[in-house]
Structure formats: C-alpha cells, structure tokens
Image (tube, helix red, strand yellow):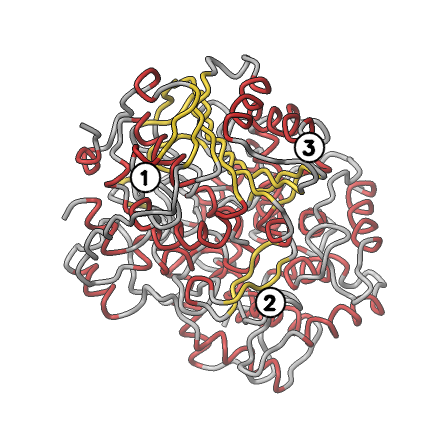
Amino acid sequence: MTRRKFALLSGAAAVGAYASIKLQKPPEAPKLGVGPAGKSAVAIIRVKSYSDDLVCGMLEGIRQCGLNIRGKRILLKPNLVEFDPATVINTNAAVIAAAVEVFERLGAAEVRIGEGPGHRRDTLDMADDARYRATIPRFESVFTDLNRDDVSPVKGFAGEREFYFPNSVLGADLIVSLAKMKTHHWAGATLSMKNFFGVVPGSVYGWPKNKLHYYGIPESIVALNRQFGSKSFAIVDGVVGMEGNGPIQGTPKPVGVLVMGSDLVAVDSTCCRVMGINPEKISYLRMASDLGHLRPERIEQRGETIASVQTNFALIDDYKDLRLV
Amino acid sequence: MGEVYLESRLEFLRANQNPDGGWSYFPGKGSWLEPTTYAMLALHGRGDDPALDRAWKLVRSWQLRDGSFRPSGEVQDGTWVTALAVTLASIRGVHDSSVRAAVDYLLQVVGAEHNVYTRVGSFFHLIKANLDVSHEGWPWRAGNASWIEPTAHTLIALRKVGGGYRSAEVERRVQDGEQLILSRRCTDGGWNYGTPNMLYVDLPSFPETTGLALLGLDGVANPAIGPALDVARQFRRETKSSLGRAWLQIALRCHGREVAMPAETAYTSHDVMLAALEALGHPEGNYKLFTGERL
C-alpha cells in the first residue's frame, strides 16, 4: 500500500492517521467541475528575498487583481506551525509585516492577524520564535490566537449541527490567507486553501484538530473554503518555499515569488504549476473545482508568467506521479 | 521567597475574573472552563473563597444532561473539559449526583481508534505506524481519537474522585489510560500530542505534552519514568515555550524533582491560562492539586 493510498484510506493527517483509519475502498478521484463563470486573475510577483520591497510587490499584485479593501475589516491568516526559526515552516514575518502595511495603506478599517496552530498550543511563543513580535509593529495588540478566541456557531459545517469558529474569523470582511508554498506529505501541497485549517479553534476541537481528520483532509479543506472562500484573498509566500517531506520536515526551496488572487483555487493551482505539480491531481483542488478555476485557460495570469518562475519542487516517492509534465 | 513571581500572577488572576465568575483565555473575552479551572486551582486556599464560589457556580451551569461539561457558555457540546470539572469537584469536596454523572460520562468515552476495525488493521499492519491501539484513553471530543492531553487530565480527575464513585471500572480505566500514555512515549524519551511514530518515522516530543504525560503518570512505577523526568528537566532548561515550561514545572514538582526557582519577574503577559499554570508550578504554588491518591 502506498502512502497516498493509505492517506485515502485513513482520511487522516500525520498527526492523526492511525486514529481515523477507515477500512474502506479509497474514493474515486472527484470529477473536475466546470467552475464558476468567467476567468480568475492571479498575480505572480517576483520578489528575490525577504529584504526586497515586499510592500511594493504586494501593492502591485493587489492592483493587478483589482481587490477593493477600503473600509473593510481585514484578518491576515499566516501559517504558523512550529518552533523552528532556522527553517521555512512558517510564513515569514517580513511578509506579514508588509501585508499589515499594505492593507492599512489601502484604507482598511482594521487589520488584524490571527492564527490557530494545529498541534502546538503555545501560539504566542511560537510567534515570538518566528520573529513576528520583533518584526510586526504592535504585534501583541493586533494578534489573536484563534485557538483560544471566543467562538460562535455556524450551522451545517462538516456534517455537524453546529460548528464553532472564532469570532475574529466570522467578523472579518476579508480573510487574507498568507500561506507558505510547501509540499505536504498527505495533501500533496499546502497553500492558501489548506491554510484555513488554522481557523478551527483548538479550544473546542483540540490539538490536533482531530474532527477534521475524521471528516477527511481534502473534504475539510474544501468545506472550509466553501465557508470562507467568498470573503478571502490569498497571498502565498513563495519567496522561499519548502520541498520534499513537507509541511514540517522538508527543505527550503527558493522560488522568489508572491502569488496572489481572490480565487483561492486558481491561486493554489497556479502555485502548483510553479512548483511543478499538476493541480488536477491534487484531490482537494479537484473537489473544489466548483469554487474556483483550476484550468490554465480559465486563469488570467498577471505579473510574471508561470514559465518564467517555474521550478520543480522535490516530491516524496509516493507523490512522484503528481509531477506536471 | 518568590513573592513577586507568585503574587503578580495571582493578582493578575484576581484582577481579571469576569463578572460571570469565570476566567477567559485573555482579558476582556468570554469565560471558558479551561482557564477558569486553572485560575481556581491557583487561587485555591488563598482566601479567595467568594470569588471561587462564583466561578464554581458558573462551571456547574455548563454541565449537560449526559453528565459532560461544555467548554464555554457558547459551545453546546460536552468535551474533555469534563475531566477538569471533576477535578475541581473533588478539590472542593463536592460529591453529588452531578459529579457521579460526570464520572460516568468519562467512563463511557473512549478513543475512537480503539475499535475493532483499527485493531484488526493494526494486527495486519495496515496502519503504517508503530502504535499500540489496544488502549482506550480519552479524546478531546467523544467520537475522536485519544490523545495525551485529554487522557492525562482524565487520569488526574479519576484518581481524585471519592465519595463512593471509585469502582473497579474506574480502576481499570485509570490503569489502561496509564498504559496508553506509556505506549505513546516518543523514542527521545518524552511525549508529543500522542503520535510518537508515523509511517515508521519517529516523531519528536514536545515540552508541554511531556509535562502533561508525566502528570498523567503521577504515582506510576515504571522504568520509563526516570528517563522521562530527565528529558523533562532538559526541556525545562531549553524550551522557548512558556506553556511547556509551566507544565514541566508542575510535573517535575509533582514527581518530587527539584526545580530551580523561577526568576523574580512580575507577570507581563496577557495570557490568563499561563499566569495560572505558572503560579501553580511555583514552589509555593498549588501544584499538588494535580496529584491524586493511587487507586
């Protein structure tokens, strides 16, 4: 049994695979939907390093995507996973600081940052370790630990009569997924859509957020994006990504890009192509094909072309067949 | 000794009790059972009885008909925090039918991996991990898998129950829960959230879960405990996690290990739960409330 088949059988993550094994036939790959009408704009902005002018790059990307920010309450949602400042597990602090400045400059009514890590509870010290407090002005006053925020119920999510989400997430007019460009040993790639796992509150669902494993990882990714995708924007930190055995034990992969857009399916599909991964083979992207566009002909690529920045990310053996040819 | 450290944390807790009697994770937010429990334990026996009585009244109002407790007023489902409520009840000397209902609830809940399919799958090596799924343990929420933290808290709670609630089933579940924690020990000697190995790759342990696992193993005689305490001491010296350090201080003291005095620093964080745990882990703190009589 391959690792992927096992993942399909178990519908589980590395943190909970043994716990939620379902001894049943793996589901067939979902059919690719037509997607919404029209095309989606995705901007690829070249940024060589974190000391480059990230603010200028983000402003350009947002302009190219036609995003209106004025008067909106913004929640920036980085990907904060683990204590490990030496690697590229977490969204870089410079990207978050630049996003705060950009959204404030563009007239947001409020810009806050929120994250709820999946298997470590000490969010604030992890943020410290990732240099968030040192890099982001007024960090303490704008940051919310989504694992321990107050919550409100949403009806019918993930098969539950009521599912609870942080008030900071529910109250935001726009959630900006500040994801990291990484491979993922269960999902294939973790990008702006998978980043929404961090909005599920640990105070209700635990560490790890085992309810999502039981519901199924791809199913949960899609459900979260069905819930919040319409009020979301993505800025994927691909300045330095992670290849190989991501999302934690992989190795740094410099790409030198920010990938941005309002259609998170299109953003993640574009990221996959940049990484040398076929997005149509990523289960959750196929399942989300009614929410956004996977096919290149339905994505209006702005800024850099994919070909000009494309660099194959190393894939673990069980994911070799994801390679874009 | 340690006046500034301890008193600043206790004062922070006193100053941030919510009007409904509970404590929130951060000041200005709604009350939750978890920080309320730790704040109540930290302030126990320190002349705060009226405040603690109000808190206890709030906690009791969160009990559901099935005996479980809700984690906050907003959330309508019972969760692992039921164990915290049982611990509080024991410490307050409450032994009534509602506590019995909570204990019965805890005894009904098992980790979902302890089912026939998973055990058969494990037997035939369909689960690509070196994991013992023969123990029941406790999940964060009924219907999910068992994990170290909820299992440790339930063991603490069940060791403390009195008033005739102790039974052969309580004894069996406690012993089985202890075995689950021992079986989930990482190869580096500590514990993570509960998955020491995945795809036959060993995963590292974390400070906070190592501290909690050791509390779950309070009073257990096993050759693994000594080396695990050494790992805990090393974690405590090196970790960047305040939460991890706080749980390790409590666990090491409960296991009778000497722990260096914390620096005489006033509390500057806004984290209510951390303030309570740091106060509990102080040499003059109430860390012993996490220990329980052996069954």
Looking at the image, tell me whether mark 3 or mark 1 is earlier in sequence order.
3
Q: Is residue B263 visible?
A: yes
Q: Please, is residue B6 above or below residue B91 in the view?
A: above
Q: CA distance from mark 2 to mark 3?
A: 29 Å
Chain letter of disc 2 in the image = B
Amino acid type, residue under disc 3 in the picture:
Phe
Query: What kind of element bears circle 2?
Result: loop
Amino acid type, residue under disc 1 in the picture:
Leu
Amino acid type, residue under disc 2 in the picture:
Val
Chain letter of disc 3 in the image = A
Q: Please, is residue A250 above or below residue B153 in the view?
A: above
Please give the label number shown on residue A269: none
Crowding near pointer 3: few (<14 within 10 Å), some, many (20+)? some
Residue drawn at the location 53% of the way across and 71% of the way down: B158
Chain letter of disc 1 in the image = A
- Name the residue beneath numbered marker 1: A294
Q: How many marks?
A: 3
Across and down, in percent, residue B282 comes to 71, 47
Please give the label number shown on residue A139: 3
Query: What kind of element bears circle 1?
Result: loop
In this picture, residue B62 sits left or right of residue B148: right
Crowding near pointer 1: few (<14 within 10 Å), some, many (20+)? many
Q: CA distance from mark 3 to mark 1?
A: 36 Å
Residue drawn at the location 78% of the way across and 66% of the way down: B21
Q: Nearer the viewer, residue B34 or A140?
A: A140
In this picture, residue B251 sits left or right of residue A108: left
